[in-house]
Amino acid sequence: MMQVSTLRKLGIVARVAAQQAGRSRTGSAVLKGIHAAATSVGRVLHQLWLEVTGFTFLVLAGIGAFAGYREYGKYQAHVTGPGRLILAICFTLSFTWFGLSSFWRVKRKTKSSERRATS
């Protein structure tokens, strides 16, 4: 005989309970309310995730810019070659792009959700 995990049993019980609750007006209203709240919370958490990662990328770009500044000084003093300076510039540009694009995605998602809300 096949054994069923506890997590799978809980999933089955939850699905049956949701089906039973959906058959009554009150249960259906509660389920729709939970669904609406979960959707809203999920959207806000995704926006927060994009903002936190964008900020992190911009901080890393700032660190790269500082390293590029130091490497430029060493390059001007003929202590090192241009390789490390080029690497620092590429790092700074790419992480700046990642950070800004993350904030742009937040702005785009906010605008699209506002359009849906007014429609």
Image (cartoon, helix red, strand yellow):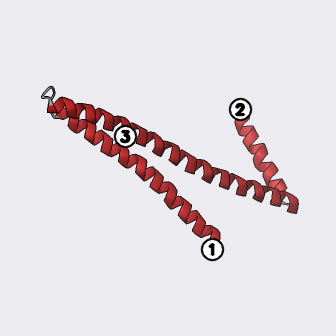
Given this view, does label 2 or label 3 mark the residue nearer the observer?
3
Q: Residue at x 36, y 46 (%)?
A: 96
Residue 19 left/right relative to 7: right
The answer to whether one can see residue 84 in this image is no
Residue 119 x %, y %: 63, 74
Q: CA distance from mark 1 to mark 2?
A: 50 Å
From where the camera sits, is residue 45 visible? yes
Amino acid type assigned to the residue bearing label 1 in the image: Ser
Task: Check disc 1: other Cα within 10 Å, few if <14, some if 14-19, many if 20+.
Answer: few
Disc on the earlier residue, 2 or 3 = 2
Q: Is residue 29 left or right of residue 60?
A: right
In the displayed structure image, the side of residue 70 where residue 34 appears, left or right: right
- Residue 33 in the image: x percent, y percent? 77, 57
Asked whether the residues under the numbered discs 2 and 3 touch, taking CB atoms below 8 Å apart as contact, a structural biologist would say no
- Residue at position x 33%, y 45% in the image: 94
N-term-proximal mark, 1 vs 2: 2
- How many marks the image carries: the answer is 3
Secondary structure of the residue carrying tag 3 is helix
Residue 119 numbered tag? 1
Looking at the image, the residue that sits furthest to the left is: 78
Viewer-closest of 106 and 21: 106
In the rendered structure, which amino acid carries the disc numbered 2? Answer: Gln
CA–CA distance in space, label 2 to label 3: 52 Å
Three-letter residue code for mark 3 = Ala
